[in-house]
Image (spheres, coloured by chain):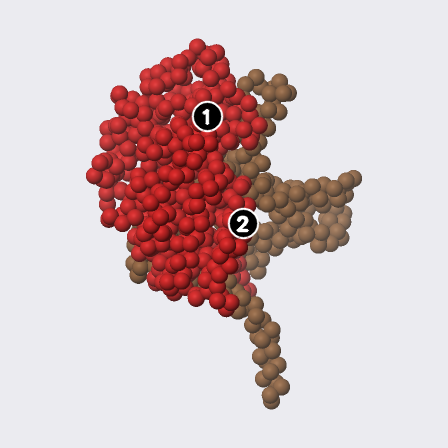
Amino acid sequence: MKKFAALFLTVSMVCGLAACSSNSGGGSSDGGSESKDEGGSDGKVAINVIAAQYGQNTKTWWEDFVKEFTTEYPDIDLTVEVESWNDIYTVVNTRISNNDAPDILNIDVFANYQADDLLLPAEDFVSKETYDKMYPAFLEQSNVDGTIWAIPDLASARAMYYNADILKDANVEVPTTWDELTAACEAIKKHDSKIYPWGIDMTTDEGQAAFAYYTWNNGGGFVDDDGNWILNCDENVEAIEYAIGLVNDGYTNSDPANDTRYDLQDMFGAGQVAMMIGPNSIPTYIADGGYSINYEVAPIPTNGGNDSVSAGVMDRFMCFDNEYSDAELDAIKTFFDFFYEDARYSEWVLMEGFLPATSTGGEILAKEDESMASWVDIVGSCNFYPTAKTEWDDVKQGVINAEQQALLGGNVKELLDELQAEIAE
Amino acid sequence: MKNKTFRKAEPYIWILPSIILMAIFILVPIVFVFRMSLSEVSKAGIIRGFSGFANFTKVMNSSAFKLVLRNTIVWTVAVVVLSTVLGFILALMLNNEFRGRKIARAIMVFPWATTLVIQASAWKFIIDTDYGTLNTLLLRLGIIDKAINWTPTAGAYFTWEIACGIFVTIPFVTFCVLSGLQSIDTSYYEAATVDGASYWQQLFQITMPLVSSSLTVSTVLNIIYVFNSFPIIWTITKGDPANHTDTLVTYLYKLAFYNGKQGQAAAVSVIGFTILLICASVYMVYTLRKGDD
């Protein structure tokens, strides 16, 4: 009896604690979304939005937005839930699993939702006037089988930042090629062994960016011109071997698998890292962090005579197909018209130091700020991750894993061959 | 007659709310996870149909899973065993009369009372090569002349995580054992002293048997807590590099929310649940049988 009681107690404890600690989300359903409520009892049309938190100002910005919006459109009951990047995927997937998809979602990826037929085509939920403001190249990033499924809300571009004082003291020119970069690293290391000449981030959060920086600037990349995965092409193998070589030669931060972009930005701001590839928001980050270094921006070094390619990152708005009435769809269109009003949209982009995704927003910002003008040009011509492909999640984690395995001594060619075979399955 | 029936049913009525709550918040999620593990789940989290053991097969065939399983066993055994030994020793010390005992006991609570994320962040900050306080301290004291990389390998990182796990687990063991020690009648020790028993004889013949039930409770709970622990590893390394510091819980989180493989994540969850159930049951039955003997 005692043994039975003990067993029962153990089972209960394990069950209880397993359930408490489970993060995998319990809810599930057999289908996408359920019909949306016809607003509140007061006759208002309700719209709910889940938005990503870009920084410390995002929540306040959305609070003000909701106030202004509901003042101007009292018949629309707008709710905006701001979620951190750590939580947003969990929240959204759990809500979808529970038949409670948001009406509008602001996030980076869309392909998985589109593949499950959960989304509306962009032209169904955005007015033509607003739709026409978007950079066509940005809209193309959300193109699946000829239909645009999401609209860009902002973008960022990457370039090389360097500490001008360190390079001057080490008597080094700004590197434009990989050979020059290696030579510059060697010279900086000789000049001061405490400084990391080059910053690399191959963490779970941003390792795919490192893959992009080196492969794109060596003529490789994630996909070929026809959109086929080319993860193990020779250019990619050479590029990753080069990056790992920089680490092995002691030219980089000591722990690329764990030093995040923010760690690198802090080290760059503190003058501990001489050069790094980073987003256009670094000047804001450095100013907010109280750092005072003399830094400049330059194109990312390349190899084999290739033109320098900047990496662009773009986030999106998408609309879930919650079987809307005409009134609800009009309310959603009104939301986007209001959001993309030029002055308001410029504020949104500047709020956390990003770049605009609309041509009108770009013009306004370029006029206001000269330094922004060059970034607006860069973002218009940079490469983007192939996020419209449903395999992207696997590829992203796969290249990060390959990089980290290579850091542990793995063979880059074998790792990328294995990844390519896995993705092709 | 009616009164008698009510009397019989009364205890069950009183515990009914608890049973309903447990069913809703514990059993239902568990059933969903089991269901998900046997289903084909889309990346957006929608169940597409029954897939048998396909998720389990995929998980078991991945090379990462074997590494992660080994890490989980090392993590659980190392943290539970070492924290139990150290916690037991600390409890023996805190059970003695000495000046400042209350303060010492209060200090013991701090690591336990602080959230794990904060603890893990503090440890990460301490051991960091570039701006860590450990290097700064040693440099200022002149013990070292240049910063040491305390985490040169994945194994070193994992060892630090285990150390952090032990640090935050010790207080729980200490207080469990301490409560057991305080319930031992001092007359046992007096009689043993009169009979000429040494300190070690008293420890193994009196103390250990009498605190074994407290130790059992703390060990079983620790096995479950430590096995399922997420914040320490996630905050310090996120399981990097390449799953070398992942445990089942961090691995399944990545599978679910980074790779969008929720079916496989549920399968890992079920595997973990089963391992935990077997280990905790065996340990508990074995310990209680020993008690019966």
Query: Farthest residue toward the left?
Result: A226
Numbered disc 2: secondary structure? helix
Query: Farthest residue toward the right?
Result: B99
In this figure, which residue is indicated by the disc labeled 1?
Answer: A254
User: Which amino acid type is marked by label 2?
Assistant: Glu
B253 left or right of B9? Answer: left
Q: Position of residue B214 (x, y in %)?
A: 62, 53
Q: Which mark is residue A63?
A: 2
B112 left or right of A406? Answer: right
Q: Position of residue A100 (x, y in %)?
A: 42, 60
Residue A31: name its quadrant: bottom left
> Which chain does the brown colour mark?
B
| Earlier-in-chain disc, 1 versus 2 | 2
Q: Residue at x 54, y 28 (%)?
A: A287
Q: Residue at x 36, y 33 (%)?
A: A379
B206 left or right of B20? Answer: right
User: Which amino acid type is marked by label 1?
Assistant: Ser
Numbered disc 1: secondary structure? loop
Q: Residue at x 57, y 70 (%)?
A: B17
Q: Quadrant of the N terminus of chain B?
A: bottom right
Q: Chain of mark 1?
A: A
Q: Position of residue A136 (x, y in %)?
A: 31, 41
- Report how far apart the C-alphas of labels 1 and 2 lie in the structure: 41 Å
Q: Colour of chain A?
A: red
Query: Farthest residue toward the top?
Result: A171
Q: Position of residue A127 (x, y in %)?
A: 36, 52
